[in-house]
Image: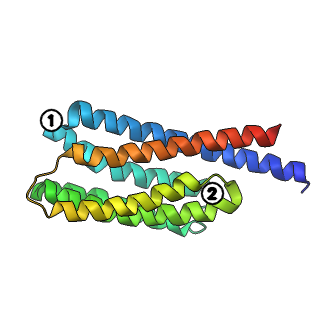
């Protein structure tokens, strides 16, 4: 493959990744808007949103891995799919116990999903570049998860608004990554 062909293939792959990151960022931003608009005042809406967030993460990771060689070629994303699906079920169960239990489940998930995202970002750095935001996001997710677990044991009863900043940071990092890749591709294509 010539250098021009290699650059062309890399642009196509990173264009797909940029679109994926853009969709992830927009969905997360929409989730935050829904959490603030209806989730904090309607318990049923909050429950649906809290279960749907990790379920969406599982679907998104599956879709991304499928487009990147499959789950066997992307073990960190395969792990993220399994963990996120399990989390969606665990959140549904934890909702029957209380929001402190939900926050604890979200915390464990944030740690595991963050570490998986960190590994995926490091692995992709060589192929796609511009993964610093995903690596930072994964590390921050893991730290936030530890905070959630610690906070879940407190006397204060958390709400969906306690989870919303976590999703907002995720949206921010995905959108930054999308823009970064789009700009890098335009520079490469010149």
**Residue 160, picture quadrant:** top left
Q: Name the quadrant of the C terminus.
A: top right
**Residue 34, picture quadrant:** top left
- Taking depth in this image into account, of 188 and 53 the one nearest to the observer is 188
N-terminal of the pair, mark 1 or mark 2, is 1
According to the picture, the residue beneath numbered tag 2 turns out to be 68
According to the picture, the residue beneath numbered tag 1 turns out to be 42
**Residue 76 image point, x, y percent:** 51, 67
Kindly identify the residue that appears in the image at 57 percent across and 46 percent down: 177
Is 68 left, or right, of 133 in this rendering?
Answer: right
Above or below: residue 27 compared with residue 156:
above
Is 59 left, or right, of 144 in this rendering?
Answer: right
Kindly identify the residue that appears in the image at 63 percent across and 60 percent down: 124
Is 57 left, or right, of 87 in this rendering?
Answer: right
- SS class of the residue under badge 2? loop
- Taking depth in this image into account, of 178 and 92 the one nearest to the observer is 178
Q: Dot 1, crowdedness within 10 Å: few (<14), some or many (≥20)?
A: few
**Residue 20 image point, x, y percent:** 56, 44
For residue 171, say whether it is visible.
Answer: yes
**Residue 70 image point, x, y percent:** 59, 61
**Residue 163 image point, x, y percent:** 27, 48
């Amino acid at each position: 493959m010539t250098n021009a062909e290699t650059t062309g293939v890399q642009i196509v792959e990173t264009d797909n990744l940029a679109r994926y990151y853009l969709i992830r960022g927009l969905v997360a931003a929409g989730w935050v808007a829904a959490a603030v608009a209806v989730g904090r005042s309607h318990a049923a809406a909050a429950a649906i949103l809290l279960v749907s967030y990790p379920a969406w993460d599982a679907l998104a990771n599956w879709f991304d891995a499928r487009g990147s060689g499959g789950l066997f070629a992307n073990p960190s994303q395969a792990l993220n799919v399994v963990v996120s699906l399990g989390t969606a079920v665990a959140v549904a169960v934890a909702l029957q116990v209380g929001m402190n239990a939900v926050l604890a489940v979200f915390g464990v998930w944030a740690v595991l999903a963050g570490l998986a995202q960190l590994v995926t970002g490091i692995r992709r750095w060589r192929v796609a570049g511009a993964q610093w935001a995903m690596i930072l996001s994964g590390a921050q997710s893991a730290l936030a998860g530890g905070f959630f677990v610690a906070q879940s044991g407190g006397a204060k009863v958390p709400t969906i608004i306690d989870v919303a900043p976590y999703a907002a940071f995720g949206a921010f990092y995905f959108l930054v990554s999308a823009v970064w890749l789009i700009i890098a591709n335009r520079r490469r294509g010149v």
